[in-house]
Image (cartoon, coloured by chain):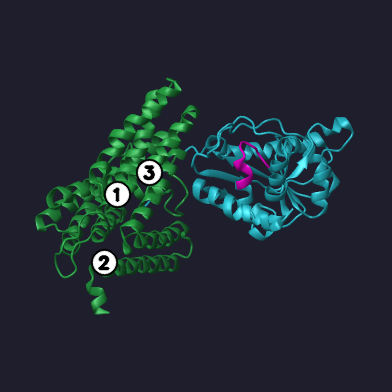
Amino acid sequence: MTAWLADPLNTGVATLFGLILLAGAVTGLLTRRHPGRRYTELKLRVRTWVFIIAVFVVAIAFNRVVGVMVFGLVSFLAFKEFLTLVPTRRVDYSVLIWAYLAIPLQYYWVAAGWYGMFIVFIPVYVFLFLPMRMVMIGDTQGFLRAVGTIHWGLMTTVFCLSHIAYLLALPDRTMGPYGVTGATLVFYLVVLTELNDVAQYIWGKLLGRHKAIAKVSPGKTVEGLLGGVATTTLLAWFMAPWFTPLNGVESLAVGLLIGIAGFIGDVVMSAVKRDIGVKDSGAMLPGHGGILDRLDSLTFAAPLFFHFVYYLHY
Amino acid sequence: MSPLLRILFVVLIAYPVTLLWLGINVRHRERLPLKGPAIVAANHNSHLDILVLYSLFALRLIPRVRPAAAADYFLRHRWLAWFSRSVVGIVPVARGGARRGNDPLEGCYAALARGEVLIVFPEGTRGEPERMAQLKSGIWYLVKRFKGLTVTPVFLHGLGRSMPKGSFLPLPLFVDVFVGKPLVFGEDKKEFMRQLNERFTQLRSKTAPTAEPSAEEKHHA
């Protein structure tokens, strides 16, 4: 048992399940304290977290190919949710089919560990190919908006999110007794980003007074943001020796980066939803909304974290 | 009519296409009939409609769930006819047959008499995406013949966008399925059709959620 727990990934996953049990217990306690309230939303949210964690564990527990397939599927669901949400032109039907084709290709580059292709494929080839395809159809009404919509969707849901998967393709590092692998980096990034969301929410609930960005997301407060970023930074510093090749200062910086980027990703997606006129991006995750409501912070945190670590250590 | 082929069709085609490729959000699934005879009336935008509708029913009910479909289209040659009848399980309706003295609904009466759940598309044809066409009143004659029969309206949203007429590959998009409250027979045909139409209008109005930011906007942490 102690030997098993000595592996930081095992300890990490066990802690996650501990946290979710705790959340379940708190929900139960709240329900008993306030018999008048039903806490349906909270219960659903906790239950969905169990499912999300289970899928996440599958993604990092086996090997790069399994991980790439899971994250590829996540990108597919996210892009599909994005397209369902945003208005598209009917003439662009075939362009959208091409856009979907970018997903398996992008994740193939990840599985193959072909960094050069991974980094240019979407922003260069796909972003230039799709407008050409649209010009061949010939409808110029709403052209710029259509191009922008499709590009933004691919950028966030496929290109940005695929950076999580590419962590799995980075070479292993022998540091400490267990070494740093792609899986530990993915764990570090994803868990910190999601905990940052939760921490900002809790700090906001506890101390929130001043609205951070009232026009876009009225629920966000300065207190929530600062409390969340501080919590994330502390946790990033604490976890770094086991999960990353980062030193003390670097890990503090990366904590700040994840905390702030997570917040920005969240409010940018809020702006998109507000523009369209919906509150949730979908209904895939009961208690959370859509899958984009859960991934919004990662769309910004993942590429920034990736390049920070990649530049310094790989 | 082989139940095995129909179950395979649903498991190997309807489920993967509907649940994986597309993805559906069903509102009020519990309003669907659990046994026949009963009628499910849906709007019609694409060939995917039937796959989505099949995926809403329990697998053991599938051999007894059958869509009414145009004979002139689905039986137009031998292979398609075999596929439509044995694999999809359609009940053929001869459009325009009334003029030749045959009741086009003969097959539907027989299916309901066998206690099956009949899926009908009262618009008659796939039309403009997401736009309801004039409802055909054949459905009233069915309910009239079998008193006590319920008609459950189902509004499908997003399928016309996913697979416009003339395309072969469905575009992956989430699809909304709204199941309405069942309707029972009424003597007045016009009134019955008006009510059915109203149910569809009502269900359709739920497809465009206008998100008014509430005072305390919900966070998703």
The residue pinned by badge 3 equals A103
Label 2 Cα crowd, 10 Å radius (few <14 / some 14-19 / many 20+): many
Do tag 3 and tag 2 residues touch (Cβ < 8 Å)? no
- Where residue B114 sits: x, y (%)? 81, 54
| Residue in the foreground of this view, choosing between B186 and B43 | B43
Output the chain of dot 2: A
- Where residue A56 sits: x, y (%)? 35, 59
Tell me the CA gap for discs 3 and 1.
Answer: 11 Å
Q: Of label 3 and label 1, which has the lower sequence position?
A: 3
Above or below for A31 versus A93: below
- Where residue B13 sits: x, y (%)? 58, 50
| Residue in the foreground of this view, choosing between A2 and A294 | A2
The residue most toward the right is B101
Residues shaded magenta: B42-51
- Under mark 2, the amino acid is Leu
The residue pinned by badge 1 equals A110
Q: Give SS at disc 1.
A: helix
User: What residue is at 34 percent from the left and 56 percent from the top?
Assistant: A65
Residue B35 location, quadrant: bottom right
Q: Which chain is cyan?
A: B
Above or below for B49 versus B62: above
Residue A80 seen: yes
